[in-house]
């Protein structure tokens, strides 16, 4: 496993991460990995085909989004 360093992370961002990790009962490393997984999964998520600049918001699409951790 590669090493993760927080040395160059801005203090304000580190403190937010620290607070969120405590709230979720995770270590800072666990919270960071969790957030990275969510961000990368969202990037790969397939969105429905737009309909006149919008997309049809179906129950199926909402359920899929919830399973992928998007809220």
Image (cartoon, rainbow, N blue to C red):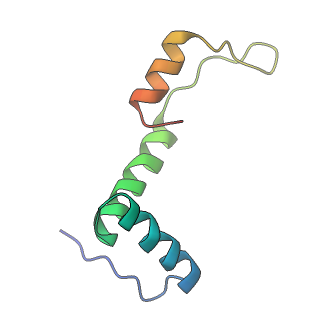
**Residue nearer the viewer, 41 or 71:** 71
Residue 47: give x, y in percent of width and height: 57, 25
Total numbered labels: 0
**Looking at the image, which residue is at 82% across and 14% down?**
52
Outermost residue to the right? 52
Quadrant assignment for the N terminus: bottom left
**Looking at the image, which residue is at 49% across and 27% down?**
65
Residue 16: give x, y in percent of width and height: 52, 71
Residue 5: give x, y in percent of width and height: 35, 82
**Looking at the image, which residue is at 43% across and 37% down?**
69
Please tell me in which quadrant of the rendered image residue 27 appears: bottom left
Please tell me in which quadrant of the rendered image residue 20 appears: bottom left
**Looking at the image, which residue is at 50% across and 78% down?**
15
Quadrant assignment for the C terminus: top right
**Residue nearer the viewer, 25 or 65:** 25
Residue 21: give x, y in percent of width and height: 38, 65
**Residue nearer the viewer, 66 or 49:** 66
2 to the left or right of 10:
left
Outermost residue to the left? 1
């Amino acid at each position: 496993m590669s090493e993760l360093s927080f040395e160059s992370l801005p203090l304000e961002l580190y403190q937010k991460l620290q607070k969120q990790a405590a709230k979720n009962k995770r270590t800072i490393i666990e919270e960071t990995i969790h957030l990275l997984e969510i961000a990368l999964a969202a990037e790969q998520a397939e969105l429905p085909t737009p309909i006149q600049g919008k997309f049809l918001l179906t129950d199926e699409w909402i359920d899929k989004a919830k399973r992928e951790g998007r809220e």
